[in-house]
């Protein structure tokens, strides 16, 4: 009689411990999936901004004169309910190297997209934007000193 009782007790202990241990692994997996989804969305944003800057540069360069071009970017107001930032990263001389998008509350979650060579960041106009209910404008200014790119945010009009 003690053998069935012991096996029943061992089985119950194993079942109860699984009930308490499995949620720990489940929530870790859910967190990893959420981070991966945020990184993919940030990568899309960074690629979109980088491609837009390059497209503006190509258009300005084909004009063969001093020109200022702007484009309203269609960026999401948040990613997974969190605020994010987009920044043009430059080197010491001001040449744009890449566009990075990162979560404001967690700098570990980020994505980068390379910028084609030949663009200079216009630090006077802007190179960092924060998501939200704003219009985001990318611009390229071509003049005799070079091709300058920038990002600027504008508040949406109150309706």
Image (spheres, rainbow, N blue to C red):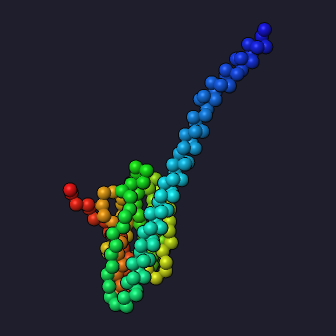
Residue 68 x %, y %: 31, 81
Quarter of image, res 83: bottom left
Q: In percent of the image, x 57 and y 34: which residue is there?
A: 23
User: Which residue is more in the foreground, 10 or 75?
Assistant: 75
Q: Is residue 44 above or below residue 11?
A: below
Q: Please provide percent x and percent y for residue 74.
A: 37, 64
Residue at 51% in and 72% down: 114
72 in relation to 130, above or below = below
How many numbered marks have been drawn onto this rendered protein structure? Answer: 0
User: Quick one: 128 or 27, which is closer to the camera?
Assistant: 27
Residue 50 picture location, percent across and down: 45, 71
Q: Is residue 65 visible?
A: yes
Question: Above or below — where is 36 with respect to 135?
Answer: above
Residue 42 in percent (x, y) is at: 47, 60
Quadrant assignment, res 62: bottom left
Of the 4 image quadrants, the one containing the C terminus is bottom left
The residue lying at 42 percent from left, 69 percent from top is 49
* 18 left or right, relative to 87: right
Q: Is residue 100 visible?
A: no
**Outermost residue toward the top?**
1
* Placement of the N terminus among the 4 image quadrants: top right
Residue 109 versus residue 26 in the image, above or below: below
Question: Which residue is rendered at x = 58% and y = 44% of the image?
Answer: 29
């Amino acid at each position: 009689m003690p053998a069935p009782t012991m096996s029943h007790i061992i089985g119950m202990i194993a079942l109860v411990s699984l009930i308490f241990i499995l949620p720990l692994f489940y929530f870790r997996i859910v967190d990893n999936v959420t981070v991966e989804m945020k990184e993919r969305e940030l990568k899309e944003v960074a690629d979109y901004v980088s491609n837009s800057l390059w497209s503006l540069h190509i258009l300005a360069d084909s004009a063969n004169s001093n020109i200022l071009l702007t484009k309203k970017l269609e960026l999401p107001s948040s990613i997974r309910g969190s605020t994010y930032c987009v920044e043009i990263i430059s080197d010491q001389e001001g040449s744009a190297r890449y566009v990075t998008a990162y979560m404001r509350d967690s700098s570990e979650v980020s994505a980068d997209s390379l910028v084609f060579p030949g663009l200079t960041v216009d630090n006077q106009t802007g190179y960092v934007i924060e998501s939200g209910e704003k219009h985001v404008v990318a611009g390229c200014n071509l003049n005799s000193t070079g091709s300058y790119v920038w990002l600027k945010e504008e508040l949406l009009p109150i309706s």
